[in-house]
Image: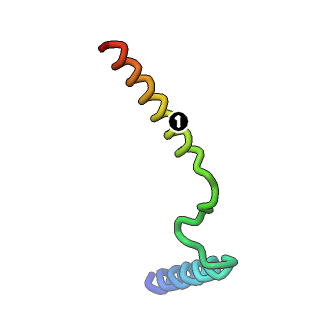
Amino acid sequence: MIIAVLVAAGLLAWALDHAYRRRPYPRNRLAGSMDVYDRDAQRLEGDLVAEERHYSAMRASRS
């Protein structure tokens, strides 16, 4: 039983080392490009501007 666990741990360590060495360059955990414009941020900004215009128009009409 102990030998099987040691063999499994050795195989796991070998597989992880093999997978790590196959990467072409060291990557960050949050690998991704930062030079792309974020469409979600653009959409959120547009929604906030539209909401502010809507509520400011409602407040002006109530006064």
* Quadrant position of residue 51: top left
Front-lying residue, 38 or 11: 38
Q: Is residue 28 above or below residue 55?
A: below
Q: Which residue is disc 1 drawn over?
A: 46
Quick check: 45 left or right of 55? right
Q: Residue at x 63, y 60 (%)?
A: 35
Q: Is residue 23 above or below residue 46?
A: below
Residue 50 screen position, x and y as percent: 48, 29
Quadrant hosting residue 17: bottom right
Q: Quadrant of the N terminus?
A: bottom left
Q: Amino acid at mark 1?
A: Gly
Q: Quadrant of residue 57?
A: top left
Circle 1 SS class: helix
Taking the view exactly as shown, the residue that stands out farthest to the left is 63
Q: Position of residue 60 (x, y in %)?
A: 36, 18
Tell me: 25 left or right of 61.
Answer: right
**Residue at 50% of width from left, 40% of height from top?**
45
